[in-house]
């Protein structure tokens, strides 16, 4: 099911700064050497969609969220500050207590106007998460969060939030959002008390990386590189749905031992990496293509990072293969590479990353011919409940242009649980990508599946779930 073309008329109140409801410490707090790497210095949008809840009749969701946010910022007061850069590109949070940007809005649409499948890419995202000031999306010296609560004519609402990624990863952001939600529902304090402790992920006094870290190699650009989040006019956005049947099909193509030992993440990541490489049609089969797997490292330390830690706590292990090898060899080849890359990650590995950052000027991860995959299925976005129940959809608003995709938990129009993956590619490559996925999957089931696609809006956002013909 695809979104029909949708035009949203939104009336916004004057943006405001929501500060902590009580005085908070004025101090300068260091980010970790994982937080402040160049590749995390950007803003990432998240969308939460909620249905009308009769029990909450008479309550304004925006007012409820605003009040709870102010109280949550007492516990999470660094978010009310501003980011500063010191010597050696080191980032600090200046805990000024100025607050986060907040917008209350109303839209003349109902939830059902968005279509049956509420999944990325969302139409009119720039209206649902309005960049209120010319410089509000900068990384330094601006609010660290932008939140917009848009009331729908049906009584539901959309909670959209833009995060400065240097502050938190997905589990850290969900921890903050859950705290706001708990206070909105009447709890006196968050169930998880936040822990800063960013020094736990700092480099050694004399940095000495112990791993090669090919994820940060500087690769000459030949066919393209990263595209900023706000430069998407020539990109196509689509989503693909993978249910148990699609995953079973891919798993069946692996040798028995690999079939048993590989996770859904391993298999689907390898499949998408291979299909994307085919779609990009490189002219040189000897060019290296990379897949970076975002791996949560919270439990890989001994002892583990403390409960409540909300900084970036992940590694970016990389698998590398030539286009020729990746496209010509069986899926098992790519799966083995993904598994091998993930297996590197340990406490020693992430400390080596921190050392590498400091020793090499906090470089960006490799973006040339690189694909990044992040699994947020267990982050808990959909479980955030402000009093109106769990989110109908919760998670990333779209793919990171040309670079990164997400595995998001999703229930399709037939009630089947699966994974939705937002993709962003140049239009011609996207068409080839969709065909490649269709060919690979329908070949296993005699052609009884189809790709359904439709134009979305004037940013070439398109909705292309992989759906069975009976849906």
Image (tube, rainbow, N blue to C red):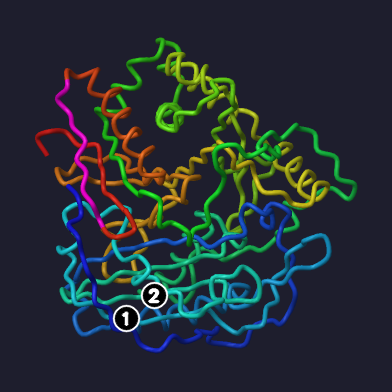
Q: Residue at x 38, y 37 (%)?
A: 429
At label 1, counting other C-alpha atoms closer than 10 Å, the crowd grade (few under 14, some 14-19, many 20 or more) is: many
Q: Is residue 312 left or right of residue 18?
A: right
Disc 2 and disc 1 in contact, CB within 8 angstroms: yes
Q: Which mark is residue 211?
A: none
Q: Position of residue 437 (x, y in %)?
A: 31, 29
Q: Which residue is mark 1?
A: 105
Q: Residue at x 41, y 44 (%)?
A: 426
Q: Residue 46 sits in which quadrant?
A: bottom left
Q: Is residue 92 visible?
A: yes
Magenta includes 455? yes
Is residue 189 placed above or below 287 in the rendered structure? below
Q: Is residue 75 visible?
A: no
Could you say whether the residue bearing mark 2 is in a helix, strand or loop? strand
At label 2, counting other C-alpha atoms closer than 10 Å, the crowd grade (few under 14, some 14-19, many 20 or more) is: many
Could you say whether the residue bearing mark 1 is in a helix, strand or loop? strand
Q: Which residue is mark 2?
A: 148
Q: Which residues are magenta?
A: 447-456
Q: Nearer the viewer, residue 64 or 325?
A: 325
């Amino acid at each position: 099911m695809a979104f029909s073309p949708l035009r949203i008329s939104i009336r916004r109140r004057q943006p405001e700064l929501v500060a902590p409801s009580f005085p908070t410490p004025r101090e300068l707090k260091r980010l970790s050497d994982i937080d402040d790497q160049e590749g995390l210095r950007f803003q990432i949008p998240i969308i939460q969609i909620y249905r009308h809840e009769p029990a909450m009749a008479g309550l304004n969701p925006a007012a409820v969220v605003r009040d709870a946010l102010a109280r949550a910022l007492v516990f999470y007061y660094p978010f009310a500050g501003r980011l500063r850069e010191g010597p050696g590109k080191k980032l600090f949070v200046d805990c000024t207590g100025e607050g986060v940007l907040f917008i209350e809005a109303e839209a003349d649409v109902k939830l059902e106007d968005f279509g049956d499948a509420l999944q990325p890419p969302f139409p009119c995202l720039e209206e649902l998460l309005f960049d209120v000031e010319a410089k509000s999306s900068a990384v330094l010296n601006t609010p660290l969060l932008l939140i917009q609560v848009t009331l729908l004519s049906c009584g539901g609402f959309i909670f959209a939030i833009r995060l400065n990624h240097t502050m938190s990863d997905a589990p850290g952001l969900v921890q903050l959002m859950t705290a706001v939600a708990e206070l909105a529902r009447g709890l006196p304090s968050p169930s998880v008390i936040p822990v800063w402790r960013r020094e736990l992920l700092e480099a050694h006094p004399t940095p000495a990386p112990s791993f090669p870290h090919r994820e940060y190699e500087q690769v000459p650009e030949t066919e393209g590189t990263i595209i900023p989040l706000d430069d998407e006019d020539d990109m196509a956005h689509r989503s693909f749905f993978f249910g148990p049947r699609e995953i079973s099909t891919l798993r069946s193509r692996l040798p028995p031992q690999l079939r048993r030992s590989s996770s859904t993440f391993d298999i689907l990541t390898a499949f998408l990496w291979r299909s994307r490489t085919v779609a990009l049609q490189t002219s040189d089969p000897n060019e290296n293509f990379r897949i970076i797997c975002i791996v949560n490292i919270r439990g890989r330390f001994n002892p583990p990072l403390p409960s409540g830690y909300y900084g970036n706590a992940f590694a970016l292990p990389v698998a590398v293969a030539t286009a020729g090898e990746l496209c010509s060899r069986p899926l098992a080849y790519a799966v083995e590479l993904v598994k091998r890359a993930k297996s590197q990650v340990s406490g020693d590995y992430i400390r080596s990353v921190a050392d590498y950052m400091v020793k090499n000027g906090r470089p960006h991860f490799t973006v040339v011919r690189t694909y990044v995959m992040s699994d947020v299925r267990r982050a808990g976005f959909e479980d955030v409940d402000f009093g109106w129940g769990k989110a109908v959809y919760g998670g990333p608003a779209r793919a990171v242009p040309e670079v990164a995709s997400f595995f998001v938990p999703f229930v399709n129009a037939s009630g089947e649980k699966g994974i939705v993956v937002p993709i962003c590619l140049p239009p011609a490559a996207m068409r080839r990508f969709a065909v490649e996925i269709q060919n690979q999957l329908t070949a296993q089931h005699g052609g009884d599946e189809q790709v359904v696609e439709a134009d979305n809006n004037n940013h070439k956002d398109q909705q292309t779930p992989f759906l069975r013909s009976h849906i």
